Amino acid sequence: MQVDEQMYGSLERGEHPTLRYERRLPHPPEKVWLALTEDPHLAAWFPTTIDGDRAAGASLRFRFERVDGIDPMVGEMLTYEPPSLLEFTWGGDRLRFELAPHAGGTALTFTVALEELGKATRDGTGWHQCLDSLERSLAGDPTRPDDVDRWRELRELYAGRFGPEASTLGPPEALSAR
């Protein structure tokens, strides 16, 4: 398999291990912003609903509508600056989406500050697949394939990139039963 390094996330180690993805999208920031923030668009790529006001300081609730057996999570909207910066807590993690105009499209920088290093491979794999779905959705393909084989392939790749200490937690039981 040929690897396009630009597509893959990296892991920054430190007090708060952080996943980092940089994608160049051939769509204007305003279109990407809608995909990141509007419910009908979120369903095509984000793993949960995002219930709550789109305003800094708002309480958020996240429901896994596509997977049975995972309890909802709570969070808080930290920053909401259309169409360039979106940041919120998602369970114990902090998600940050930065958008900037770039070559007729958008440079998306997505970071996830993790609550623990051991889940970096698992979450890195999942976020990679979410970003792939985001790109498909922006291109007009709203289908969201649940490709378990692709998840396993990506997980192997991320485990090799991030190492054993970042690969101690596997998928939630509800997902591993698929």
Image (cartoon, helix red, strand yellow):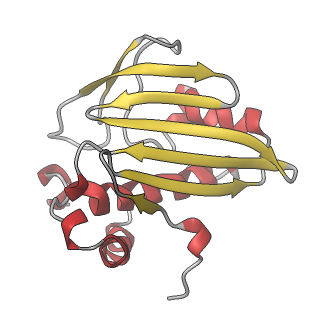
| Relative image position of residue 58 (x, y in whole percent) | 42, 11
Relative to 104, residue 52 above or below: above
What is the tally of numbered marks visible in this picture? 0
Q: Residue furthest front?
A: 15
| Relative to 108, residue 176 above or below | below
* Left or right: 61 as drawn, with respect to 7: left
Q: From the viewer's side, name the closer residue of 91 and 35.
A: 91
For residue 13, side relative to residue 68 (left or right): right
Q: Position of residue 107 (x, y in %)?
A: 71, 49
Q: Which quarter shows the C terminus?
A: bottom left
Asked where in the image residue 99 lies, by quadrant, the reply is top right
Instruction: Please state if 128 lies on the left or on the right of 66 as rendered.
Output: right
Q: Say if residue 100 shows up in the picture.
A: yes
Question: Is the residue 116 above or below the residue 38 in the image?
Answer: below
* Residue plotted at (80% across, 41% down): 28
Residue 30, percent from left and from top: 75, 32
- Residue 140's place in the image compared with 38, above or below, is below
Q: Is residue 144 among the parts visible in the rendering?
A: no
Q: Residue furthest bottom?
A: 1
User: Which of 92 and 135 lies nearest the eye of the viewer?
Assistant: 92
Q: Residue 62 appears in which quarter of the rendering?
A: top left
| x 42%, y 14%: residue | 52
Q: Residue furthest right?
A: 104
Residue found 15% across the figure and 50% down from its top: 174
Depth order, front residue of 139/53: 53
